[in-house]
Structure formats: structure tokens, C-alpha cells
Image (tube, rainbow, N blue to C red):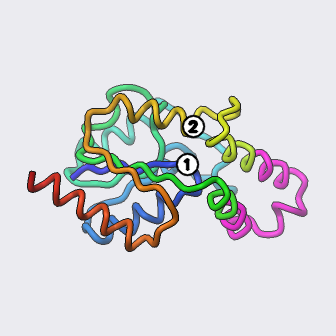
Amino acid sequence: MRIHIFGASGSGVTTLGKALSEQLNIEYFDSDDFFWLKTKVPFTEKQNPEIRNTTVSDILHTTDNWIFGGSMIHWGENIFPPFDLVIFIYLSPEIRMERLRKREFERYGEEIITNPQRAGKFEEFLEWAKDYDHDTGISNRTLNAHREWLSGIDVPLLEISGDYPVSDKINIILERINRIIYS
């Protein structure tokens, strides 16, 4: 089973992907691990797109079952093997933005407030994340872009909208997987 889970930053894609990975006993790959270089301050330097695409393509084409979490709609053509199921997660902007503020504070601590450079990056990130729903041109990763990508796929799709416990989301996904396997 090759599953792609995606949604806006802060919607719970990674949390759900890792939990589903454990439940199904298949590997979880996160787009951030390919998109960003490993640096002292995480998520500050992007990977060369050619290296990123070759690396992710090689791994996913040589692994039978996996979950790939994160948006990859602008990475290019013919990078990913066909998906067996695409799961789109949507969470209200209010809940998402609160989660992101909390996560960034846990990740970087007081520095996102006291260090002017870090504070600027934090505010820039929040504006980028907020643009997901508003689509003002700050980001190319928007709800409209995701909906457009979804309209062009010919793969079983599951949309989960709302703030449900991870266990409930997993049950919904397992139900859908069973329908795919046994139909």
C-alpha cells in the first residue's frame, strides 16, 4: 500500500502519518526530510530540488509499502510512484495557527520572541502558514492549489476535515483501506 497524506502546515499530517505507520507496520517518509537540509537550526536551508527529487524517487520506487506525508504538488512530474490512496487533511485555520504557534515555541523556545532575527522568521512563517487559507500570493502551498491538484488525480481519495482524535482518523483510514483492498 502506497499512501500519501497531506494538508496545511499544522494540520496533523506528520502525527497522523507516524501513527498510521505504526498501525500498518509500514515506513513513514516525511516530505520535510527531503525538502530541507539537516542544519543546526532546522527548516532554514532548502535541499537542491534535483537531489531532493532523485532521493525521494529512488526510495519510494524501491520500497513496496509506505506512507509519504507532506505536500509535494510542486515538486515535478514522474517523481512519485502511483499512490494507492491519497488522504487530504483539513483543519480550521484557527486551530492550525494555534498549533503552529505552540509547536514553534516548543521547537525554538523564547528565542522566537527575544532574538529579533528568529522573531522575524517566526512571524514570516506564520504569515506563510496563514496564507494557506487566504491565498494572497505569499505561498504556493495553498488550499486552492491542493484542491486543484486533487481534481486532477485518479486515485482513491479520502478527505478528513475537522479536529478529531488521531485514533478516530486511523479508524476512518483503515475502513477506507479495507474497502480498497476488498472491492
- Is residue 40 visible in this depiction of the protein? no
Dot 2: element: loop
Is residue 102 one of those drawn in magenta?
Answer: yes
Residue type at mark 1 is Ala
Residue for point 33% across, 54% down: 67
What range is drawn magenta here? 100-124
Q: Which mark is residue 175?
A: none
Percent from the top left, x then y, of residue 19?
38, 69
The image quadrant that residue 168 belongs to is bottom left
Q: Earlier in the sequence, mark 2 or mark 1?
A: 1
- Is residue 31 visible in this depiction of the protein? yes
Say few, some or many: other residues with alpha carbon within 10 Å of mark 2 (under 14 / 14 to 19 / 20 or more). Answer: many
| Vertical arrangement, residue 69 with respect to residue 139, above or below | below
Q: Is residue 141 left or right of residue 73?
A: right
Question: Which of the pair 54/31 is nearer the observer?
Answer: 31
Give the residue number, with chain letter if any, for mark 2.
141
* Badge 2 vs badge 1, beta-carbon distance below 8 Å: yes
The image quadrant that residue 112 belongs to is bottom right
Question: Which of the pair 95/57 is nearer the observer?
Answer: 95
Is residue 42 one of those drawn in magenta?
Answer: no
Q: Is residue 72 left or right of residue 175?
A: right
Q: Main secondary structure of the magenta part?
A: helix
Give the residue number, with chain letter if any, for mark 1.
8
Percent from the top left, x then y, of residue 8?
55, 48
